[in-house]
């Protein structure tokens, strides 16, 4: 079977699909991953053949334009970037599909170009979720469903469902399923290339707290979204070891670090978090689910809509709390000292372990698609 995987502009939205891709390759299927040219290093770095579709886009700039245009941070979404990315990618994606003739398209929730391409090619389409299905709450698909994006290919309307949805999210954090059939899948973290540093071989002398802020927030200037330096300063009041896992380009924003803090070099979150007693972050899906898989209590300081959604769902499931810059010190202290937070995080991690592995789902995928149709 030939499987065309398609992702849009952020590597954090590609990474959750990598374990499934490895399973497909191990099962003997042919795989190509299509994405914007600037995403090819992340794709090929995961050991998979990449295909450039569309031009390079500045996704931080597109995101910021959506934020400014919204008029308030309550309304900040990625819808503008999603629609623009689909517009720029779809022609090349359809052209490559007609050349390579895949049997199946798998895409992340924000990649509407892939849904269009599957419909044009008349082949099954699978949506691979990162966490809770935030896209069910956004209007962007409705906005393009009958627009030029589909009309240029002679389609009256983009279909509203998928042949299958792969869902890594525990039911306690997930919205009720829509009309598409769903298959649970275990969230297996992949955070890109990494090294195992010598200091990680030994248990910390004090409770270890990870501070991380995703792959985009520090790039968005003009909006107060990158709160990691404030969090690190607040945690200086606690008797903890603070490990900062951020893009090295953001380090100048931290200034002089407190005595209890250090930067992690070339270290993936899934390697660090099992040694941590808490993690503080912005609420991105990849970070939230990686911490969930590690069973670590989380404090989320969300700034945009999808982050607030992830934080709300996690808090409702008992795996963490929603925070604010002025209360970080007290809230992290509570995560470290109140047993219910560790118990809630452990329950979510144990549930994740019971779900079918990506390798198993990859092996069953042809049969699942037949059953779903």
Image (cartoon, rainbow, N blue to C red):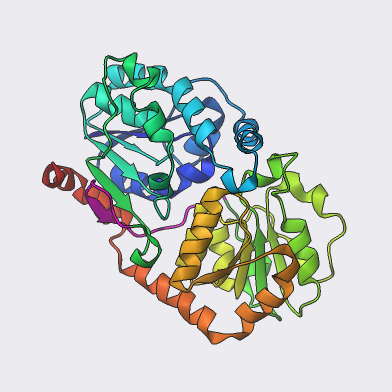
Q: Is residue 167 above or below residue 37?
A: below
- Give yes or no for residue 179 being in the magenta stretch: yes
Left or right of 25 in this view: 6:
right
Q: Position of residue 125 (x, y in %)?
A: 26, 36
Q: Is residue 157 above or below residue 351?
A: above
* Quadrant of the drawing holding the C terminus: top left
Q: Nearer the viewer, residue 221 or 51?
A: 221
* Quadrant of the drawing holding the N terminus: top left
Q: Nearer the viewer, residue 98 or 66?
A: 66
Q: Nearer the viewer, residue 238 or 153?
A: 153
Q: Is residue 200 visible?
A: yes
Toward the right, the furthest residue is 256
Q: Give the number of callouts.
A: 0
Query: What residue do we see at 80% from left, 65% from top?
Result: 233
Query: What residue do we see at 25% from left, 52% from top?
Result: 182
Q: Is residue 40 visible?
A: no
Q: Position of residue 305 (x, y in %)?
A: 54, 49
What span is in magenta? Answer: 176-193
- Give yes or no for residue 127 being in the magenta stretch: no
Q: Position of residue 60 (x, y in %)?
A: 63, 35
Q: Position of residue 168 (x, y in %)?
A: 36, 57
Magenta span: predominant SS is loop
Q: Is residue 156 above or below residue 139?
A: above
């Amino acid at each position: 079977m030939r499987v065309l995987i398609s992702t849009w502009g952020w590597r954090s939205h590609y990474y959750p699909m990598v374990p499934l891709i490895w399973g497909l390759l191990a099962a003997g299927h042919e795989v190509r991953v299509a994405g914007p040219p600037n995403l090819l290093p992340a794709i090929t770095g995961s050991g998979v053949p990449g295909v450039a579709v569309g031009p390079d886009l500045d996704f931080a700039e597109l995101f910021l334009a959506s934020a400014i245009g919204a008029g308030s941070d309550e309304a900040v979404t990625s819808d503008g970037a999603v629609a623009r990315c689909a517009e720029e990618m779809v022609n090349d994606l359809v052209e490559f599909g007609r050349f390579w003739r895949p049997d199946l398209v798998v895409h992340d929730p924000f990649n509407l170009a892939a849904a269009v391409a599957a419909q044009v090619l008349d082949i099954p389409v699978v949506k691979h979720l990162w966490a809770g299905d935030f896209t069910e709450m956004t209007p962007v698909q409705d906005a393009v469903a009958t627009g030029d994006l589909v009309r240029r290919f002679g389609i009256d309307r983009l279909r509203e469902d998928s042949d299958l949805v792969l869902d890594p999210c525990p039911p306690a954090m997930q919205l009720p399923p829509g009309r598409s059939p769903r298959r649970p899948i275990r969230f297996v973290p992949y955070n890109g290339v990494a090294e195992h540093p010598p200091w990680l071989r030994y248990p910390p002398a004090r409770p270890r707290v990870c501070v991380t802020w995703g792959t985009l927030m520090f790039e968005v200037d003009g909006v107060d979204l990158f709160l990691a330096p404030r969090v690190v300063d607040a945690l200086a009041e606690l008797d903890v070891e603070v490990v900062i896992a951020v893009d090295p380009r953001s380090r100048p924003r931290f200034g002089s670090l407190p005595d209890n803090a250090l930067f992690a070099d070339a270290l993936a979150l899934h390697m660090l978090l099992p040694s941590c007693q808490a993690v503080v972050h912005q609420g991105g899906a990849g970070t939230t689910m990686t911490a969930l898989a590690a069973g670590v209590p989380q404090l989320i300081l969300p700034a945009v809509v999808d982050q607030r959604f992830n934080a709300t769902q996690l808090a409702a499931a008992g795996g963490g709390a929603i925070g604010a810059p002025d209360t970080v010190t007290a809230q992290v202290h509570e995560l470290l000292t109140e047993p219910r937070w560790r118990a809630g995080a452990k329950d979510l991690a144990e549930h994740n372990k019971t779900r079918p592995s990506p390798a198993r789902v990859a092996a069953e995928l042809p049969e699942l698609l037949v059953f779903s149709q």
